[in-house]
Amino acid sequence: MRLKSIPLGILIFFILFGGIAFTSAMNWWQTESSKIPARYTEGEAAGQYNPADIRGSYTFGDINKNFGIPLTDLQAAFRLPAGGDVSTIKVNSLETLYEGLTVEMGTGAVRLFTAFYLGLPYDLASNEETFLFPEAAAVLKTNGKMTADQAEFLSTHTLKDELPTSDTAAPAVETTRSPTPAAASTEHVAPAGTITGKTTFQQLLDMGLSAADIQSAIGEPVPDPAMAVKDYATAKGLEFSTLKTALQSKLDAK
């Protein structure tokens, strides 16, 4: 049986939009990602959310919701502005907020902090270049459930601030201070051959990566050699930590 054009058009309309209405009613239709991380599939933590799957697009509200970490602790740990709604701040905004540091403060730091706060398994070997603020260390020591290995790792991966001190006593975890990146410094110096937020594409070439290596990691030809990898990631709407990992792995293989 052949359907004429008008009845056929009406049928297609109802199939298309009727299907959307039905799946929406059943809560099957989603236009945005659910911001729910993957779960551990084995070990003692099986079934729990895995901090390693936290994405830069997550907000601190998502971290609070999925992992149960109080917003006040997150605010203190990452020096988020006091008095505002920190639940709407995206995790990857830390990369821009603290771009003046000699080490990356971004999604990787949030993943590490979350895992340590809950005492969940986390690959320390591949996160040697991840550091936390002293405030984060204080929160973890007070409220966290770190394992012995995690506590030892933290002892050598806490930034050393050179901030002016006041004669008035301040709480161990200060939630109102939000210094600018220029006010925060660290004694840490990245080892030679380590990609940082200031590394340019020309420096990657000088380190031994070929143009083909870089193109394979970023998915397109090498841009302006004078451009920093972090600036490139920001311009493309990508996570710097993701590009850094891909490029660093190629560099380490040399």
Image (tube, helix red, strand yellow):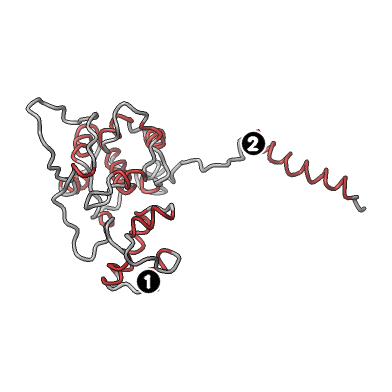
Vertical placement of residue 65 versus 155, above or below: above
Taking 140 as reference, is 59 left or right? right
Question: Helix, strand or loop at disc 1?
Answer: helix
The x and y percentages for residue 181 are 23, 43
The x and y percentages for residue 20 are 68, 40
Quadrant of res 212: bottom left
Give the number of the disc on residue 52: none
Taking 204 as reference, is 32 left or right? right
Taking 157 as reference, is 27 left or right? right
Give the number of the disc on residue 24: 2
Which residue in the structure is indicated by mark 1?
213
User: Callout 2 environment at 10 Å: few (<14), some (14 to 19), or many (20+)?
Assistant: few
Which label's residue is closer to the chain start, 2 or 1? 2
Q: What residue type is labelled 1?
A: Asp
Quadrant of res 144: top left
Quadrant of the image for the C terminus? Answer: bottom left
